[in-house]
Image (cartoon, rainbow, N blue to C red):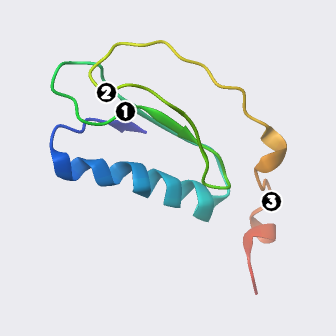
């Protein structure tokens, strides 16, 4: 996901990214640009909701994170509780 958070209320996107990772049992990577004035960091969230990596806002950075693909539920049928 590419994010362009400029306002303080955009900070909720971090919480939304965590929720999306958990409810979809997938990794979520939210990327913001490094221009001055940006309020939100780029971040990577695991399927369990753990923020694995987070950058500093308003700074250009190249980052990488190792993910454990076994954490992802790859069969949609396994995601159902019923």
Q: Residue furthest right?
A: 70
- Mark 1–mark 2 Cα distance, whole angstroms, equals 5 Å
Dot 1: within a 10 Å radius of its alpha carbon, few (fewer than 14), some, or many (20 or more) residues?
many
State the image coordinates of residue 31 (x, y, percent, origin top left).
41, 31
- Marks 3 & 2, CB-CB < 8 Å contact: no
State the image coordinates of residue 80 (x, y, percent, origin top left).
74, 76
Q: Earlier in the sequence, mark 1 or mark 2?
A: 1
At mark 3, the secondary structure is: loop
78 or 38: nearer the eye? 38
Q: Mark 1 points at which residue?
A: 41
State which mark lies toward you, 1 or 3. Answer: 1
Q: Mark 2 points at which residue?
A: 57
State the image coordinates of residue 13 (x, y, percent, origin top left).
35, 50
Say if 20 sits above or below 43 in the image.
below
At mark 1, the secondary structure is: loop
Q: Mark 3 points at which residue?
A: 75
Residue at point 24%, 39% (across, down): 5
- Mark 3–mark 2 Cα distance, whole angstroms, equals 35 Å
The quadrant in which the C terminus is found is bottom right
């Amino acid at each position: 996901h590419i994010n362009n958070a400029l306002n303080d209320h955009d900070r909720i996107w971090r919480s939304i990214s965590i929720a999306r990772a958990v409810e979809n049992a997938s990794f979520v990577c939210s990327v913001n640009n490094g221009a001055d004035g940006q309020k939100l960091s780029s971040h990577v969230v695991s399927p369990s909701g753990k923020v694995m990596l987070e950058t500093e806002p308003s700074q250009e950075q190249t980052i990488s994170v190792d993910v454990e693909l076994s954490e992802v539920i790859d069969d949609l049928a396994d995601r159902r509780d019923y």
